[in-house]
Image (cartoon, rainbow, N blue to C red):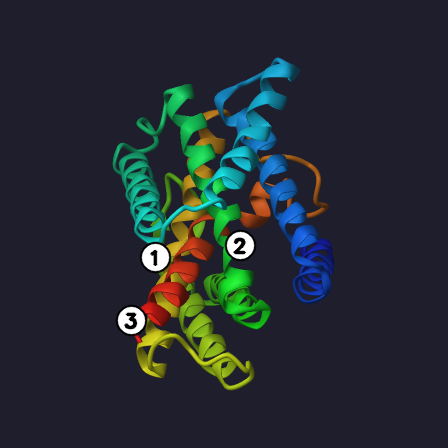
C-alpha cells in the first residue's frame, strides 16, 4: 500500500509540476476547474446524493462559481470567504471530537454548501495564485503542504504517542503535526533561496507563517474525515490508486492554498 501511495503521489506531483510550468493559462484554469468538478462529484456522496442528475448538477456548481469569482472577486471579499471557511473547519472538527463523534455537520444542505465554499475558493486561489505570483511561488506552497503531510506521516509513525483527534482520525498524533510543521518550515526556508520571486514579507515571518498554514491544513484533512465518518466511507472515491478519490489527495490543499494565495497577495500589497 505504501509503495502504491508513493508511486501515485509521485506521478501526480510530476504531472502537476509539468502543467504548472508548461500549460498555458487557459489549460491550467481548465485543469483546476476539472479537479474542482470531480471533487464536487465526490463531495455529493457526503450528503448522500444518489441521483445522477443531481450529482452532476452539484458537481458543476463550484466551477461555475469560480468562473464568476474570476471576473472580479476582490481581495477583501476573498479574505472574508477564507475566514468563513477556516471557522467552519475548526467548529465542525472540534465539535465532532468533543462530542466523541456524535455531533458533526449533519445537514445535507450545509454539507453541500461547505463543499461549494471550499472547492470554489480552492480553484479560485489556484488560478489566481499562478497568474499573480508565478508558478515557482505556487509550487513552493504546494511543496510546503506536501512536506507537512510527509513529515507528519513518518514522524507520527516513529514518535507518535499523543492522539490529535482520536474520534476524527485515530492515526494522527501531536508529534506528527509538529514533525510535519518543522519539515514544512524547512522546505519553505530552503525554497525561498531556490525561486526567483522574492518572498512577500521578510524571511522569518514568511517561514513561520508557512509553517502555521501547513499546520492549519490538517483541519482540511480532519474535516473530510468527519464527513466520511458520518456516511461510513473510507475514501471519497476510487480514482487514485492507493489514495482513494481526488478529495483524499487535495483535502489539506482546499484550505491551505487559499491561505498561501492571500499571504502572497496581501504581502505584496503591504510592501
Of circles 2 and 1, which is in front?
2
- Mark 3 → mark 2, Cα distance in angstroms: 21 Å
Residue indicated by mark 1: 162
Crowding around mark 1 (Cα neighbors within 10 Å: few <14, some 14 to 19, many 20+) is: few
Residue ID at (70%, 52%): 27
Q: What residue does disc 3 label?
A: 270
Q: Quadrant of residue 15?
A: bottom right
Label 1 to label 3, Cα distance in Å? 40 Å
On the image, the x and y values in percent for residue 173 come to: 39, 56
Tag 1 and tag 3, C-beta contact below 8 Å: no
Query: Within 10 angstroms of label 3, few (less than 14), some, or many (20 or more) residues?
Result: few
The first of marks 1 and 3 along the sequence is 1
Residue found at x 67% / y 48%: 31
Residue 50 pos. (x, y %): 60, 15
Q: Which residue is mark 2?
A: 126
Position of residue 23 in the picture relative to residue 37 (left or right): right
Residue 175 visible? The answer is no
Give the spatial CA distance, label 2 vs label 1: 34 Å
Amino acid at each position: 500500500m505504501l509503495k502504491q501511495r508513493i508511486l501515485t503521489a509521485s506521478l501526480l506531483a510530476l504531472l502537476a509540476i509539468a502543467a504548472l510550468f508548461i500549460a498555458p493559462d487557459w489549460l491550467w484554469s481548465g485543469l483546476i476547474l476539472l479537479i474542482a468538478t470531480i471533487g464536487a462529484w465526490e463531495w455529493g456522496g457526503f450528503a448522500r446524493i444518489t441521483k445522477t442528475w443531481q450529482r452532476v448538477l452539484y458537481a458543476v456548481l463550484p466551477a461555475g462559481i469560480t468562473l464568476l469569482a474570476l471576473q472580479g472577486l476582490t481581495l477583501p471579499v476573498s479574505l472574508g470567504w477564507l475566514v468563513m471557511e477556516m471557522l467552519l473547519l475548526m467548529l465542525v472538527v472540534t465539535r465532532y471530537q468533543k462530542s466523541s463523534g456524535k455531533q458533526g455537520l449533519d445537514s445535507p444542505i450545509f454539507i453541500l454548501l461547505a463543499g461549494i465554499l471550499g472547492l470554489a475558493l480552492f480553484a479560485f486561489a489556484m488560478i489566481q495564485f499562478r497568474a499573480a505570483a508565478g508558478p515557482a511561488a505556487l509550487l513552493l506552497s504546494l511543496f510546503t503542504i506536501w512536506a507537512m503531510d510527509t513529515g507528519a506521516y513518518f514522524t507520527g509513525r516513529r514518535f507518535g504517542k499523543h492522539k490529535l483527534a482520536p474520534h476524527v482520525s485515530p492515526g494522527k498524533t501531536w508529534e506528527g503535526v509538529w514533525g510535519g510543521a518543522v519539515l514544512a518550515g524547512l522546505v519553505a526556508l530552503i525554497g525561498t533561496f531556490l525561486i526567483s520571486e522574492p518572498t512577500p514579507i521578510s524571511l522569518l515571518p514568511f517561514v513561520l507563517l508557512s509553517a502555521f498554514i501547513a499546520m492549519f491544513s490538517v483541519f482540511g484533512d480532519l474535516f473530510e474525515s468527519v464527513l466520511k465518518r458520518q456516511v461510513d466511507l473510507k475514501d471519497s472515491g476510487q480514482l487514485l490508486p492507493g489514495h482513494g478519490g481526488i478529495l483524499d489527495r487535495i483535502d489539506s490543499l482546499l484550505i491551505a492554498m487559499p491561505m498561501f494565495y492571500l499571504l502572497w497577495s496581501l504581502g505584496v500589497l503591504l510592501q
